[in-house]
Image (cartoon, rainbow, N blue to C red):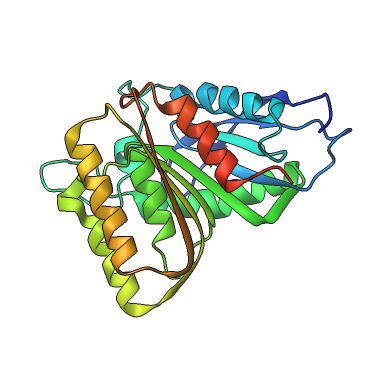
Amino acid sequence: MTAAISKTIPQFRLRAAETGTVYWIYVEAPDAKTEPGPWPAVLFLDGDDQFRHAVKAYRSARKAGEVSPLLLVGVGYGAGYIRPGNRRQRDYTPTAMRGEPGTGGGDDFLEFLTERLWHELAGRFPVDEEARGLAGHSLGALLVLHALFQKKPFFNRLLAIAPSIWFDERSILHQAAKLREKQKKLPGRLFLGVGGEDSPSTKKDLARLQRQLKAHPFAQLEVVSRRFAGKGHYDALQVAFREGLRVLFPAE
């Protein structure tokens, strides 16, 4: 591994025709002079709030020789979790939930990620098209699971931490079950993580997903699960991101 780990590239903004929203894009890229690529790209949701944790996790893993050179991309709104302009409740939810107006925009947002944003990244950086990563936490992890449980998923390296499986009467479990009825294969790798001190409901719901995937597995889908002792819903982020990157993109 080279001494130059990575450098931070200033963010740019990108308007999505699918959602009508201007997204703030944050980037951490390897040094192209010493590591010319192509690099697998990993898109991290909640970029305004969580991208710094992803960068710290990646840099520490790189120094330890645990992961390959990666292009990290944070997708945000220029506004944190509950501030005006943040549309995570719309973008990260695959279905419209009764009593939660403005939800259910997951498909439009996913189209933006796989079309407009991915093409933009491929035009700016040497992107490896064979390993496409998507990472998220909580509601963002719900969108990660939705991205996986597609007939032909675009992303094949999925990192989901403490996913909000509870949303809309656990509709994501029904989505996975319906897909499994139609097809037996789903090539890819899925990393599931949760803090040992997260809420009982979050841990219980994740266990339900794990049991479902074990009882009715998809051929060619590798699933790795971790529970992080002593960590809660938010303070598990950095350690979970590091372990997920290590599992999904191990150093060669």
Is residue 240 left or right of 68 when viewed as pictured? left
Q: x and y percent of residue 211 in the render?
A: 27, 58
Q: x and y percent of residue 157 in the render?
A: 54, 52
- Residue at coordinates 37% horizontally, 55% vertically from top-left? 146
Q: Where is residue 171, by image quadrant?
A: bottom left
- When the figure is inspected, residue 179 is found, relative to residue 44, above or below; the finding is below
- Residue at coordinates 81% horizontally, 24% vertically from top-left? 4
Q: x and y percent of residue 53 in the render?
A: 51, 23
Is residue 189 left or right of 64 when viewed as pictured? left
Residue 157 visible to an observer of this rendering? yes
- Residue at coordinates 58% horizontally, 22% vertically from top-left? 56
- Residue at coordinates 38% horizontally, 52% vertically from top-left? 145
Extreme residue toward the right, this view: 33
Extreme residue toward the front, this view: 229
- When the figure is inspected, residue 131 is found, relative to residue 3, above or below; the finding is below
Q: Which image quarter holds the N terminus?
A: top right
- When the figure is inspected, residue 180 is found, relative to residue 24, above or below; the finding is below
Residue 78 visible to an observer of this rendering? no
Q: x and y percent of residue 159 in the render?
A: 47, 44
**Pick the front one: 49 or 193:** 193
**Pick the front one: 39 or 107:** 39
